[in-house]
Amino acid sequence: MEVPSYIALSRLVAQSRALEVTATNMANANTPGFKAGRVLFSDWLSRQTGADSPRGGKVVSFVQDRATYRDQQAGPVQQTGNPFDLALGGDGYFSVETSRGPRLTRAGRFTPMADGRLGDADGNALLDTAGQPIRVSKADQRIVVAADGSVSSENGRIGRIGVVRPSDAMRMTAEGARTLRADSDTVPVNKPQVIQGAVEDSNVQPVLEMTRMMADLREFQFTTQFVQGEADRLQSSIDKLTQRKT
């Protein structure tokens, strides 16, 4: 068993994952409400038997991809003037109805659909505080959204947009570029800050992501060279042993 090669290979797998996450971030630098992904690596300790020397040889440390989490930093808010564009100035997420159940999003580009529901770019209906779709009629011409999420028109109150947050922000799984699945309970945000006529841009900073990708690529190339060097060393040893026997 060539332990150095296996340790290096575990590092290669981790760096490959890091490059994949960074590439996804860069691809979504212009996606409204997108939250950059970050990888978390940790040691995986393998206890060896019959390894009294050298010192420390009883435990071999491999690299493992422990988790991928979302950077919760808010992206910049851009004014659009569209009354159906909504941004969140503080904590929380909009809740939308999908075929897989309610999902969270900060991509606030909504538009009235044929049945009157307000839908996002993927056709998912925006939900109110009771978990029901927000609906506007053709008679509602002047839509006003207050900071607390209350929606009204010249014909009166329509409803209140539900703004929620997961109890554990680190336990969210991305489903596409715009929606997230909360793997923990969600609770309403007491004092939401809904901004009408604006959208939140991606929190990805392309220059920083490019720098991170270059560093990850250098790490990947260095480890690849190490693995190749180990392979060459083993092949050279085998060749020399074979020559001696013949």
Image: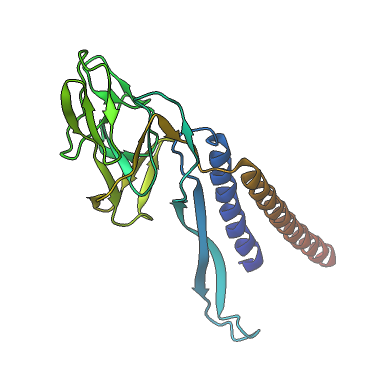
Give residue 10's position: percent from left, percent from top: 58, 59
As drawn, 150 above or below 36: above
Q: Residue at x 46, y 44 (%)?
A: 35
Give residue 104's position: percent from left, percent from top: 32, 41
Report the front residue among 168 and 21. Answer: 168
Q: Is residue 209 left or right of residue 128?
A: right
For the image, the number of numbered tags is 0
Q: Is residue 152 left or right of residue 230?
A: left
Give residue 175's position: percent from left, percent from top: 38, 38
Residue 113, by quadrant, is: top left
Q: Residue at x 84, y 67 (%)?
A: 244
As drawn, 37 above or below 222: above
Coloration mode: rainbow
Q: Residue at x 50, y 39 (%)?
A: 202
Report the front residue among 183 and 131. Answer: 131
Give residue 1's position: percent from left, percent from top: 61, 67
Q: Quadrant of the C terminus?
A: bottom right
Q: Furthest-front residue in view?
A: 154
Report the front residue among 222 and 173. Answer: 173
Q: Is residue 172 left or right of residue 202?
A: left
